[in-house]
């Protein structure tokens, strides 16, 4: 069990070639689209959910910030579908890889910060030095605020990676315990299996919540710079 504990987090390969790119491109294919004027119930519910999410995230933004609405909606759909597909047996979850989460967080964070320096450079620089700061503390506060700004994309990526990885590890451990107890004690097996089902439901919620949190924090960074 210890040898295979982290096997599901290893990037898969096909004939020695990395298959992560194909896995990343697969979730958008599962999103249904309609070519007809009247959509079915599934597409109608999907469009209603997308409108509700985008309205909730874009309400606080001005006109310039709302130009990111398509990107943010695409981001939350991609992360949510990727997290949910990773809960299937013998599947690979790209969001458990810190490198991929950094590849999503850094460009979005950098774009928001650069937009802030281009459009509101005075307000952007004012974040580094709060008003009324004593003169001896100015150098230290500037360094602290700079570090806190640069650490934002790392915090985004680590938060998503840690939450998804921890849930997968816990499900793996409880699933292994269920199999081990099945030949020893049936009542204990049923109790552990019930815990596993409840944990799976919790992980579905975590997969959706983490997608929302990641996108919401990017939206807040954008709001601070527009």
Image (tube, rainbow, N blue to C red):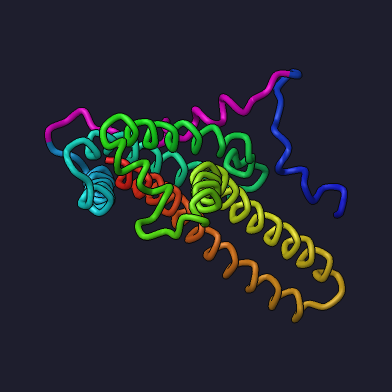
Question: From where the camera sits, is residue 48 visible?
Answer: yes
Direction from residue 176 to residue 37 in the image, left or right: left
Q: Is residue 147 above or below residue 181?
A: above
In the picture, the quarter occupied by the C terminus is top left
The residue located at (34%, 40%) in the rendering is 72
Is residue 23 within the magenta segment? yes
The answer to which of 90 and 143 lies nearer the viewer is 143
Picture coordinates of residue 127 (x, y %)? 38, 48
Between 152 and 130, the one nearer to me in the picture: 130
Q: For the N terminus, which image quadrant?
A: bottom right
Q: Which stretch is magenta? A: 17-37
Residue 129 position in % (x across, y down)? 41, 50
Q: Residue at left 22%, top 52%?
A: 60
| Residue drawn at x 39%, y 36% as measured from the top left | 113
On the picture, is 88 further left or further right than 105?
Answer: right
Magenta stretch encompasses residue 5: no
Q: Is residue 52 left or right of residue 38?
A: right
Residue closest to the far left: 37
**Residue 84 seen anywhere in this rendered image of the structure:** no
- Using the image as rendered, state which of residue 62 and residue 206 is in the foreground: 62
């Amino acid at each position: 069990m210890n040898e295979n504990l982290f096997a599901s987090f290893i990037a898969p390969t096909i004939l020695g070639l990395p298959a992560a790119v194909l896995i990343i491109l697969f979730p958008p294919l599962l999103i249904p689209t309609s070519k007809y004027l009247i959509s079915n119930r599934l597409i109608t519910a999907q469009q209603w959910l997308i409108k509700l999410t985008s309205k909730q995230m874009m309400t606080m933004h001005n006109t310039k910030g709302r130009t990111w609405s398509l990107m943010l909606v695409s981001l939350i759909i991609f992360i949510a579908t990727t997290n949910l597909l990773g809960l299937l047996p013998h599947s690979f979850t790209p969001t458990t890889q810190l490198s991929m989460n950094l590849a999503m967080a850094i460009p979005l964070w950098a774009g928001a910060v650069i937009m802030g320096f281009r459009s509101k450079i005075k307000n952007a620089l004012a974040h580094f030095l709060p008003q009324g700061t004593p003169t001896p503390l100015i150098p230290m506060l500037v360094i602290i605020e700079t570090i806190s700004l640069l650490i934002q994309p790392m915090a985004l990526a680590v938060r998503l990676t840690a939450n998804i990885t921890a849930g997968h590890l816990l499900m793996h451990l409880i699933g292994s315990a269920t199999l081990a107890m099945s030949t020893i004690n049936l009542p204990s097996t049923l109790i552990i299996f019930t815990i596993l089902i409840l944990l799976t439901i919790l992980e579905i919620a975590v997969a959706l919540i983490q997608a929302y949190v990641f996108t919401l924090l990017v939206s807040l960074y954008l709001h601070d710079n527009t």
